[in-house]
Amino acid sequence: MTIPPIDYTAPLFWIIGLLLLALLALPICLVSRQQGASPTRRATRLALHGLLWLVLLGMAVQPRWRTQLPAGRVLVVADNVPGAAADRVRDSLHLREVIRARSFRGATDTVVLLGQTFPDALLARLARQVVNWIPYDAPNQLQALTWQGVVRRGELQTVSGQLQTADGGMLRLRYGQQQLDSTRLVGSNGTFLLRYPVFTQGQTSLTLWLDDTLLDTLRFVARPLDRLRVRFVLDAPDFETRTLANWLGQQGHRVELTNTLSKGIGSALTINAPTTGANTLPDLVITDPANVGNALVSKAVAAGKNVLVLNLSRPETDVAAINRALSTRWQVRRIPGKDSLQVGPSLVALPYRFVPAPGTLPVGNYPVMVQPAAGQSGASRVAVSLLTETFPLRLSGDSATYDRLWLGLLAPLQPTSVNNMGVGAPLIQQQPTYLTLNNPTNVPSTLRVGADTLALRPAPINARSWAGLVRPMQAGWQSIQDTLSGYVYAPTQAGALAQLAQRKKIAAMTASHRRYDTHRPSTARFVETPIPDWVWFMAVLLLLASLWVEPKLG
């Protein structure tokens, strides 16, 4: 039997000690002064008082029985793991004993956990055991899932993960009833990647479906786009470019549409009047192959601004002119036997494809590519579009598709923004995660996430990035520095993300056990068991009843 360490400096220790001393001395004094009681009765009463005092002393110090755990391994199986799977693991590990989680009492020194849905009470009983973990991947169950918790409107939201299925299946990402992206699961690993340009703003909820089964709801926050200064440099704006200019103005951007009528003569249309001077270079220049040599386009590229070239008619000739004017390396190849390409409803492209080149990136599933062009003030990005006309989408009333199209096309041409908050989703209640702050105008020493505060530290690689570790304690939408918010998932809620939370918790627990087991001595295989509180309570009641009955027996 052992006694836990006692803090002799605590005031509570001295208060309890004085009470116990009084309870020891007072009965002895009172019993010794009783008249007419025989020595036997006095001895009995003193013995009962002494036993009561010992029981109260035991309640105060809480002695523990120290026993050694028996050597050996036992397989503890989560309640949702089928018996056939448990038998296969038992046979492969040559284990004799298999115990379900609801029946486990911790009577062995080494435990092999199969599955991930274990109650916290069971995990707490494994503090002294060596723990190994074997995850159980049920059919149609997510093994991993990540997305961006904060993203700007127009940027690509990327949902990636791993899901093993017996017969494959179609994985779909939806916003309400609208399908955003889909992929068919193939292969044994079941990895997937879904992307779409964000067209919402504020708190957004998506749903992830496997065929007709809802897996879970993905929540994130979409920040508004920064207002851009956009300049159209064209000889004669057509209906396509005018429709695009009006749409950009409706999005809040400052738009200037330059129309060159003849040499030295032109006109300009301004939407959302710029607050800067006339000589200020635009953030984005939209032009066509005939005007890529314009002085304004050259100045924009030299200053590190971005350029979009559209309305190509003869791609091979036009691309050569773009390369000469902007120092790019575009190459295109004609697709034989095609006069045009249908790339979507009411969306047509020229029958050409871009030749892949280092540093060249596609934009979604559209025939649009982005390539860096060296400028004097930084790397300018030049995008070339093979789309012919996009305004039919707008005319047909499909404004949502038109919005998604141009938000996606313009996302890689956005200038570098400030105060970018990076939040890896999903955020799980009581599980640690990192928040990052990139390119801030002012670096705060701390960030507030709901009722929690985390300290920021400089990132070791990026000098313009700071990171902090947070462990959210409350579920639901939590504010981030009063301007943003993030959704915290509760591990107890239904859905695939709750299963992932259990998986992460078991993985972290077993990892900490491995670190601990390599350094602790062999005596750590002993376990200390306290006497249950109900035993103390029953002993006190029994002794008090005996002290009340004893005088009445005489």
Image (cartoon, helix red, strand yellow):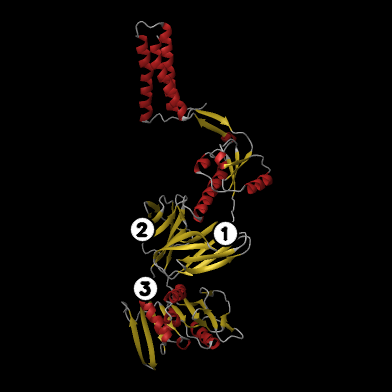
Residue highlighted by disc 3:
227
Q: Position of residue 43 (x, y in %)?
A: 43, 10
Name the secondary structure under disc 2.
Answer: loop
Point 42% across, 6% down: residue: 39
Q: Tell me which numbered mark, 2 or 1, is placed earlier along the sequence.
A: 1
Position above or below: 522 against 242:
above
| Screen quadrant of the C terminus | top left
As rendered, which of 25 and 404 lies closer to the eye?
404
Q: Is residue 372 left or right of residue 554?
A: right
**Rendered image: mark on residue 163:** 1
Q: Amino acid at mark 1?
A: Leu
Q: Amino acid at mark 3?
A: Arg
Q: Residues within 10 Å of mark 2 (few under 14, many from 20)?
A: few
Q: Position of residue 212 (x, y in %)?
A: 53, 63
Q: Is residue 489 left or right of residue 132?
A: left
Q: Tell me which numbered mark, 3 or 2, is placed earlier along the sequence.
A: 3
Q: How many marks?
A: 3
Residue 267 figure quarter: bottom left
Closest to the camera, between mark 2 and mark 1, is 1
Residue highlighted by disc 2:
481
